[in-house]
């Protein structure tokens, strides 16, 4: 997750930050030195880490076997589940949706079977015609049950580099089966997985499945052209209600979150406080305040958001910022719980920069206009419901969408909007850590 201190300081992202400062600063060449890198990690944490007053005493960075081991011992584990190390290249590619792999997700249906939960259209899986709702029967000749582990599933799909192949057998919605060998490749991921306008009684209801807050590559200032096009689609369609589906959205760019926030905020709230961010006490002079700047013509009285434990970071930022100004109804499962954010620190340390080490620790906390800044347990839902990837996007029989549509028609007093459901003990986000947890995909 990351946030934006953008006027006088730097661009942050809610969970991570997509910035180009590492390209703008030039350092003298220096040799790779593992001990120097570890010292740089320690020094950067002392300077920028949000909980720098909780760093352990007596740490000898050079005594650690790996950079990851060092970072783990520096983390304030009581609250920090997110700080990580990666490379500058991987970080920048992730926030612009430049991926390598098959390009799809898994999810458990109500029947306990495993289904394709989403597909990126230009990824190898998307180009092969895969769709949400396909049941996965076998992978590489082995039944799905054989991949079950104590904590979920381990599918052993290999490294996410071009040329790695896996063979999948699917049962399609019509009952037929198909076996596909799919080869991993580089691709540009789309964030908008589905959009449509449904006629519900006398109302036009927009339904928007949004998978991650990614900026469009090579577009300045940072923003998403997909988001612009989708907001224009709903604006032109004259929608009365909007269902924003963030069930698999692990976060991304705060610039893009602000794009959406400025379009959804009622015009009457234009100019009011969107959020504040606070760094550690040593960096308090960099704290900033952000206001809404209304765009477009959407005028919604409320927003219905479909969430799950996979809804984190910028997804929660969006919910939190709108909550003081309009009714926000959550359908599904409680969100992940990440009220803090990060930005990459190699831009401030020449040792990290020269060694292509990207340190992304928690560096700030955010608060909405009501001061809410501690939702570590996630946001609870108004209407409990469950994800059921056995049904494709937009199918009114899918649990979460059905609950949202029922709420629009009948309100939360309808018995069908309060029906019991089986909470999934495993979700796809549980198989990922670090940078990949923000943008989980196989």
Image (tube, grey):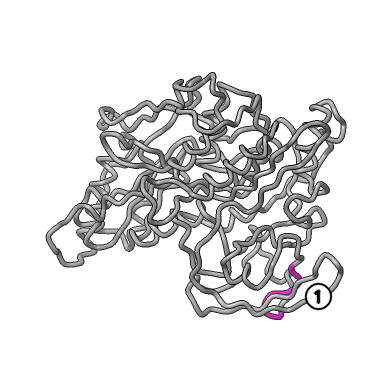
Residue 326 is one of the magenta-drawn residues:
no
Tell me where residue 303 sits by quadrant.
Answer: top right
| 27, 422: nearer the viewer | 27
Taking the spot 61% from the left edge, 33% from the top edge, the residue there is 379
Residue 8 higher or lower than 83, as above or below: above
Residue that numbered label 1 is attached to: 177
**Residue 120 at x, y percent in the picture:** 59, 62
Q: What is the magenta range?
A: 136-141
For the view shown, which residue lies furthest in the left direction? 28
- Image quadrant containing the N terminus: top left
Q: Which secondary structure class fits the magenta region best?
A: strand
| 242, 157: nearer the viewer | 242
**Residue 142 at x, y percent in the picture:** 71, 77
- Image quadrant containing the C terminus: bottom right
Q: Indicate the secondary structure of the residue bearing disc 1.
A: strand
- In the image: residue 111, left or right of residue 344: right
**Residue 229 at x, y percent in the picture:** 55, 47
């Amino acid at each position: 997750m990351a946030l934006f201190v953008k006027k006088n300081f730097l661009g942050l992202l809610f969970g991570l930050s997509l910035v180009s400062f590492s390209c703008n600063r030039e350092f003298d060449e220096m040799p790779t030195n593992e001990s120097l890198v570890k010292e740089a990690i320690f020094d950067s944490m002392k300077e920028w880490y949000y909980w720098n007053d909780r760093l352990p005493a007596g740490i000898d960075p050079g005594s650690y076997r790996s950079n990851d081991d060092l970072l783990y011992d520096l983390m304030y584990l009581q609250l920090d589940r997110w700080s990580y190390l990666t490379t500058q290249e991987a970080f920048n590619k992730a926030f612009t949706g430049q991926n390598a792999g098959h390009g799809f997700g898994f999810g458990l249906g109500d029947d306990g079977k495993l289904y394709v939960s989403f597909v990126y259209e230009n990824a190898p899986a998307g180009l092969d015609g895969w769709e949400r709702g396909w049941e996965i029967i076998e992978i590489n000749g082995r039944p799905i049950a054989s991949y079950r582990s104590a904590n979920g599933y381990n599918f052993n799909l290999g490294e996410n580099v071009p040329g790695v192949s896996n063979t999948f057998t699917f049962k399609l919605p019509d009952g037929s089966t198909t076996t596909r060998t799919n080869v991993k490749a580089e691709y540009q991921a789309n964030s908008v997985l589905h959009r449509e306008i449904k006629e519900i009684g006398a109302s036009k209801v927009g339904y928007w499945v949004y998978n991650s807050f990614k900026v469009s590559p090579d577009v300045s200032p940072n923003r998403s052209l997909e988001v612009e096009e989708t907001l224009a689609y709903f604006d032109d369609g004259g929608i009365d209600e909007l269902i924003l589906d963030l069930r698999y959205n692990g976060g991304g760019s705060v610039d893009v979150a602000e794009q959406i926030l400025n379009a959804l905020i009622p015009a009457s709230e234009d100019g009011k406080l969107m959020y504040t961010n606070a760094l550690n006490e040593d960096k308090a002079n960099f704290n900033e305040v952000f206001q809404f700047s209304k765009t477009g013509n959407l005028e919604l009285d409320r927003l219905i958001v479909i969430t799950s434990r996979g809804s984190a970071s910028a997804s929660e930022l969006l919910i939190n910022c709108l909550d003081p100004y309009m009714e926000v109804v959550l359908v599904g499962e409680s969100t992940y719980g990440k009220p803090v954010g990060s930005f990459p620190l190699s831009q401030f340390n020449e040792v990290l920069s020269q060694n292509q080490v990207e340190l992304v620790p928690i560096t700030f906390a955010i608060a909405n206009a009501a001061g809410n800044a501690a939702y570590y347990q996630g946001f609870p839902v108004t209407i409990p419901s469950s994800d059921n990837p056995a049904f494709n996007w937009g199918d009114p029989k899918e649990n979460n969408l059905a609950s949202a549509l029922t709420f629009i028609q009948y309100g939360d007093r309808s018995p069908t909007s309060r029906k019991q459901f089986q909470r999934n003990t495993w979700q796809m986000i549980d198989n990922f850590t670090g940078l990949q947890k923000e943008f989980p995909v196989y």
